């Protein structure tokens, strides 16, 4: 009876021990790539029973402290991303809005760490890069007491900021979290995490369109690429110049190669390749300026979209006045505010002659 009670106590304390001492595990060989915009095929049996305590511990042990590569843009904050039936929410525009307000926790191709796993009734929550909350260290809680009360012990070199820069991703289910293996959990997280990428470049390439992937593998540059893609395709430019074109617009040009070898002149307008000039070994000059790949930026679309004005916004007009409206008088355009007001006559006494006594007020 004593041994049975000890076994029950040890099994009950096992989750805390595993959550503190779990290490890195190797990613599963099973790889499923559902599209983020369409429902994924069923990875877990719909008739599977509710997850058991033993499986719950195995999932925590399998994924805690796992190092992965991000496939998507993660916003900072506790809302993060959610996956249900293979569909990621919010959409790209919603994520861009959150990133504009709170910042990005991880970009496509960035290396991340699953810093926390919480298995609940209908969802599994994974924290990345420390999660959205950050608390003080244990040595920041030490206090010294005396006759004047207690005071914290100052720790040299300890950062005082508790701002967290991580995010979360939630696996949501209809009824309950079903019984499944660690490999199945990885397959469900495949739309946002890459568990098998060997390098940051490989993880980043998988997030790009096939045409761009092929160009990067062949070390080619396409008009329409951004600077990050060019770096992955050709490396860092040994020479960069900045100048103005014939229209007076600023541009930046990266130069790859030196004569008599092939030389590439990559001209950027902003962050996008606008012109590519190639001087071949035999002296031919090849110029490409037509877009070869179209990669619209969701952040730019969000920034260019006008924001609606509030109905009851602050105003400098008095009560009863109308908004400004232009009116044309002759050849000049004037602006009037509210109803026209005529000056009211004021009784002004005539000026008194010099050296006369002051006139008493009426």
Image (tube, rainbow, N blue to C red):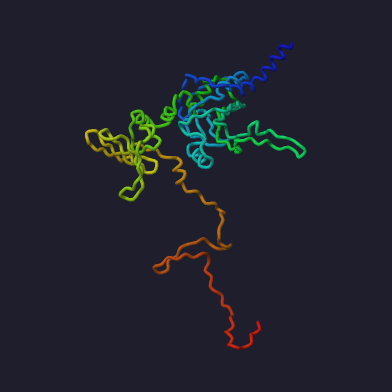
Residue 219, percent from left and from top: 34, 30
Location of the N terminus by quadrant is top right
Residue 183 vertical placement versus 207 (above, below): above
**Residue found at x 52% / y 51%:** 309
The answer to whether residue 86 of the structure is visible from this angle is: yes
**Residue lying at 54% horizontally and 51% vertically, measured from the top left:** 310
Residue 272 image-quadrant placement: top left
Tell me the quadrant of the picture where the C terminus can be found.
bottom right
Q: Nearer the viewer, residue 230 or 171?
A: 230
Residue 175 percent location from the top left of the image = 59, 26
Q: Is residue 331 above or below residue 293?
A: below
Total residue callouts: 0
Identified at 36% across, 47% down, the residue is 250
Which of the 4 image quarters holds residue 231?
A: top left
In the image, is residue 351 above or below residue 334? below
Which of 150/222 is in front?
150
Closest to the observer, 149 or 70: 149
Is residue 50 in view? no
- Farthest front residue in view: 156
Across and down, in percent, residue 263 comes to 29, 35
| Residue sticking out furthest to the right | 147
x, y percentage for residue 77?
Answer: 56, 37
């Amino acid at each position: 009876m004593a041994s049975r009670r000890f076994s029950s106590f040890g099994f009950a304390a096992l989750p805390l021990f595993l959550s503190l001492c779990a290490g890195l595990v190797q990613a599963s060989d099973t790889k499923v790539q559902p599209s983020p915009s369409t429902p994924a095929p069923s990875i877990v049996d719909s008739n599977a029973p509710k997850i058991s305590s033993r499986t719950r511990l195995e999932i925590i042990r399998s994924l805690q402290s796992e190092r992965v590569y991000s496939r998507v843009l993660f916003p900072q904050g506790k809302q993060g991303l959610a996956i249900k039936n293979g569909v990621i929410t919010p959409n790209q525009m919603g994520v861009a809005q959150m990133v504009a307000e709170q910042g990005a926790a991880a970009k496509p191709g960035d290396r991340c760490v699953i810093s926390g796993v919480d298995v609940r009734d209908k969802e599994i929550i994974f924290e990345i890069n420390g999660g959205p909350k950050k608390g003080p260290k244990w040595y920041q809680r030490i206090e010294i007491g005396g006759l004047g009360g207690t005071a914290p012990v100052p720790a040299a070199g300890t950062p005082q900021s508790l701002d967290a820069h991580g995010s979360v991703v939630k696996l949501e289910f209809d009824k309950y979290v079903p019984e499944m293996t660690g490999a199945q959990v990885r397959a469900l997280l495949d739309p946002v995490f890459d568990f098998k990428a060997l390098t940051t470049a490989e993880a980043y390439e998988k997030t790009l369109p096939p045409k761009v992937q092929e160009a990067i593998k062949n070390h080619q540059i396409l008009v329409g690429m951004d600077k990050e893609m060019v770096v992955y395709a050709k490396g860092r430019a040994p020479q960069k110049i900045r100048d103005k074109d014939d229209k007076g617009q600023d541009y930046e040009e990266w130069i790859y190669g030196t004569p008599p070898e092939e030389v590439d002149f990559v001209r950027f307008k902003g962050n996008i390749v606008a012109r590519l000039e190639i001087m071949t070994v035999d002296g031919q000059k090849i110029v490409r300026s037509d877009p070869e790949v179209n990669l619209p930026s969701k952040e730019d679309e969000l920034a260019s979209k006008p924001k609606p004005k509030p109905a009851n916004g602050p105003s400098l007009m008095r009560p009863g006045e109308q908004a400004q409206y232009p009116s044309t008088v002759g050849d000049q355009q004037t602006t009037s505010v509210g109803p026209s007001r005529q000056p009211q006559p004021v009784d002004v006494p005539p000026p008194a002659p010099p050296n006369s006594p002051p006139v008493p007020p009426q």
